[in-house]
């Protein structure tokens, strides 16, 4: 698809079976960065094409994926962050792995930014700083992890949290 193809396209809705479509479940965690990169290139052309409420069409890791694992039954721990959520702070755009539900709130990995931080002299810097505060508040249990933790890393985080709580 070229830069001047589909100049009037305002929305793009694809079914979950299409990579990147609404509700798509990734079979491999390693596929996510290249899809996000393609998404970002299209997003630069039209800002409202894909996201709905900050969720990249509710993308997640499929429970049939070899990268998927069971979380802890202990209600003190969040579920593994199998959801993919877009992040915007000022004009800066990125994405992160997270787990969100009404009971426990948002538990997020670190943000994978797709562009550089605006300079302090930039007119957008204050918007960026303001926006990043809310983003950082969700980076708690998975602090230090930009990528989806493996099952072993998740179990270690649960053990560390258990020790800190005692």
Image (tube, helix red, strand yellow):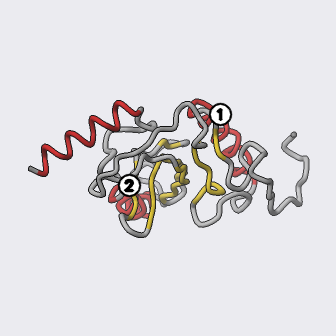
Q: Quick one: SS at disc 2?
A: strand
Most distant residue in the bottom direction:
102
Between the C-alphas of marks 1 and 2, the distance is 23 Å
Name the spot of residue 73 as percent of width and height, x first. 34, 51
Whether 122 is drawn above or below 156: the answer is below
- Looking at the image, which residue is at 35% across and 30% down? 152
Count the marks: how many?
Answer: 2
Q: Which mark is residue 107?
A: 2
- Looking at the image, which residue is at 43% across and 48% down? 119
Whether 143 is drawn above or below 124: the answer is above
Most distant residue in the front direction:
73
- Looking at the image, which residue is at 40% across and 51% down? 79
User: Which badge, 1 or 2, is on the more N-terminal residue?
Assistant: 1
Q: Which residue is mark 1?
A: 34
Foreground pick, 56 / 15: 15
Name the spot of residue 83 as percent of width and height, x first. 53, 50
Foreground pick, 103 / 127: 103
Q: Name which quarter of the figure residue 104 lies in.
A: bottom left
Foreground pick, 45 / 100: 100
Name the spot of residue 15 as percent of width and height, x first. 79, 54
């Amino acid at each position: 698809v070229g830069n001047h193809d589909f100049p009037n396209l305002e929305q793009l809705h694809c079914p979950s079976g299409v990579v990147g479509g609404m509700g798509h479940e990734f079979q491999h965690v390693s596929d996510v960065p290249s899809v996000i990169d393609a998404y970002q290139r299209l997003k630069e052309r039209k800002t409202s094409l894909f996201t709905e409420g900050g969720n990249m069409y509710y993308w997640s890791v499929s429970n049939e994926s070899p990268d998927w694992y069971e979380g802890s039954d202990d209600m003190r721990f969040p579920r593994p962050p199998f959801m993919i959520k877009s992040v915007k702070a000022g004009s800066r755009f990125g994405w992160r792995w997270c787990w969100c539900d009404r009971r426990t709130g948002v538990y997020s990995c670190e943000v994978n930014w797709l562009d550089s931080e605006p300079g302090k002299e930039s007119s957008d810097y204050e918007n960026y700083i303001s926006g990043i505060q809310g983003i950082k508040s969700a980076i708690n249990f998975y602090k230090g992890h930009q990528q989806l933790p493996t099952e072993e890393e998740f179990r270690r985080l649960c053990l560390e949290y258990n020790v800190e709580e005692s």
